[in-house]
Image (tube, coloured by chain):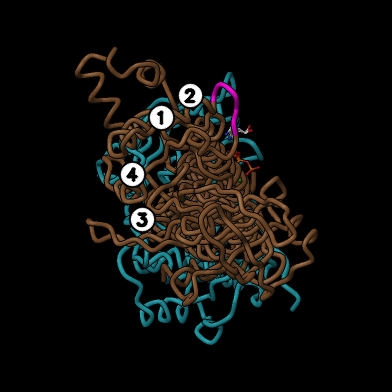
Chain colours: A brown, B cyan
Amino acid sequence: MFFRMIFGTLIRQWKKMLMIAFTIALGASLATAMLSVMLDVGDKVNQELKTYGANITVVPKENSVLNSLYEVEDGGSTGAYLREDELGKIKTIFWAFNIVDYAPFVNTKAKLDDGTEITAVGTWFNHHMELPTGEQLDAGITSLRSWWEVTDGKWIDEQSIENRNVAMVGSALAEKLGVRMCDEIHLTGSVSDLTVKVAGIIDAGGDEDNKIFMPLDTAQTLSGLDGKVDSVEVSALTTPDNELAVKAAKDPKSLTIAQYELWYCTAYASSICYQIQEVMTDAVASPVRQVADSEGAILEKTQLLMVLITILSLIGAALGICNLVTASVMERSAEMGLMKAIGAQNSSVSGLVLTEIIITAVFGGIAGFFAGYGFAQIIGHTVFGSAINMRPAVIPIVAVLVLIVTLAGCIPAIRMLLRLSPCEVLHGK
Amino acid sequence: MSLLELKNIYKIYGDLHALDDVNLKVEKGEWLSIMGPSGSGKSTMMNIIGCMDKPSKGEVLLDGVDIAKESAKNLTMIRRDKIGLIFQQFHLVSYLTAIENVMLAQYYHSVPDEKEALEALDRVGLADRAKHLPSQLSGGEQQRVCVARALINYPEIILADEPTGNLDDANEKIVVDLFHKLHNEGTTLIVVTHDPEVAEVAQRTVYLRNGRLHKETINQHFTGEIKFDNEVSV
Ligand SMILES: Nc1ncnc2c1ncn2[C@@H]1O[C@H](COP(=O)(O)OP(=O)(O)OP(=O)(O)O)[C@@H](O)[C@H]1O
Ligand SMILES: [Mg+2]
């Protein structure tokens, strides 16, 4: 009987119920989209920011002074180097987990056969590392410089190449030399000469376009700098700086022990730098300011924005539902009054209306969930350039939100129902 | 003890006395008519007796219980158990069939019983229309469904507020005949009507004016049969 009645209403008022379902679907879809994006966005924003490149640079102590004084490029002038064998240690610091990527660089001058001098850079492309923790990491400029466009050929895959005499040529240089993929270039370095095969042309949109990039060991052979690197660029997830971090960055020794511990155990850019310096001999690690600072802040702001959008959309949905449910109940007030007159208690009349609306909400919510999932993918692709992984937690959260919004939207209608007196509607007043 | 007793009942809206010191006793099994001009307080009185409204002042004893003091929830329960309601506008649930409308009263009372509901429809002569929707029934038939619904839970009192107001003479007679049957079975009937022919059938008629009872007549020749002044042309 109960379901017969509910069914009757759902069919008779299908337009209103459809509107209610649609409103709920709209709210649910926005909530789903925002929540999925929000829960997944931490990673997405980080990936996004990672494409802005490294946020920490590590250079030898002496060079660091010179670099900052004269802004000398290409390092090496003082003869100070970092040790290649210590690179793995970067992934063993306290905040190792926050180090998402890094690449060493060794810069050297090499002569072409026609006598022109060019800059050859040795680096990691996708250097495979197996860490003591068992974690595996492919680090290098393929991901660290993911915004570089490979216009011809493709990125060097260090794990599959047999011959390590390969190189990626900057687009400007490639044009000047007239080289294309698979062409060979003969280079004469300070200690040896070798012929590299062009694996791809890079369009970096900067002065990298005039350089030639090759595996670290190849460049080291060319310049006789075995086991040495000029600099390391690190991409790390960091917490925005606060007063403590600023103070610590100036001089960690000025902190009290408690402050020091708090700072050390927080992923500030400065504490990560400090920890890198601890593991690398004679190294100076410094944050590349702008990016390091903004990273965390952007993440927080993006999430705040999404929370706000979700809340507003849910409030909107609740108001919409409220209107529709009230209208639906008003339309049926005679019927509701009649039920009360023939013995229905307030609870059963309200239960009837709530059941109808909840059934409607379930359909609307499910439709909205899938729409929201699609919506999240659109956001993911347009804003973050990748798919959004649906976290399982989204489903119960959205379900609870939909329920709350639906029930909240029903409150005025239910109040009206409770006040409805049968004699008001039954005598045709 | 009377089944129903109104003692000094007032219903006051602002400065309007819809009921003004009404005293009335109704015995078990009695058939009472209430007459009076429009606005005299007839529906107001029925609402109070029917546990749908409370008096501003006074006592309403139903089976010895003062319903003026009961909570809304208890009033619903008393109404459900003891009172059958019939209205001028038939008030059926439009998307339920005749039998489902009857069963709805069972549903809120106890459990729907299709067989019993069908019997009730049979008593009002509508067994063959059980599966029809209200929109597929004539006004007279709809009112008979309402009568079936009102009597399905064996109420002690049936309250009818202008049950024949929207009916032609032929249907009026059918409904009054149904009342007669119910009366014979011992059901107490209180019928509000404008129609003297309907009122006269009852054992007793009380007259309301401006919220006061001002006259009462007893039908000396009570038969329970409706007689028309002019012969009905069919
Ligand atoms: N809820 C209310 N608020 C204010 N006044 C009311 C209310 N209900 C009824 N009244 C007034 O009380 C008086 C009695 O109304 P009631 O409906 O009882 O009259 P009635 O005798 O049933 O009339 P009718 O024959 O037209 O049905 C009327 O003047 C009416 O306007
Ligand atoms: Mg009336």
Q: Are marks 3 and 1 on the same chain?
A: no
Q: Secondary structure at mark 3?
A: helix
Mark 2 neighbour class, 10 Å CA radius: few under 14, some 14 to 19, many 20 or more: some
Which of the two residues, A355 or A73, is positioned nearer the viewer here?
A: A73
**Is A402 rendered above or below residue B206?**
below
Residue drawn at x 45%, y 36% as measured from the top left: A59
Q: Which residues are magenta?
A: A68-72
Examine the rendering and report whether any part of residue A31 can be seen: no
State yes or no: discs 2 and 1 in contact (Cβ < 8 Å). yes
Q: How many angstroms separate mark 4 from mark 2 (CA)?
A: 86 Å
Residue bearing mark 2 = A65
Residue bearing mark 1 = A61
Residue bearing mark 3 = B80
Residue drawn at x 64%, y 36% as measured from the top left: B39
**In front: label 3 or label 2:** 2
Residue drawn at x 27%, y 32% as measured from the top left: A265
Q: Tell which circle, 4 or 3, labels the residue nearer the N-terminal end.
A: 4
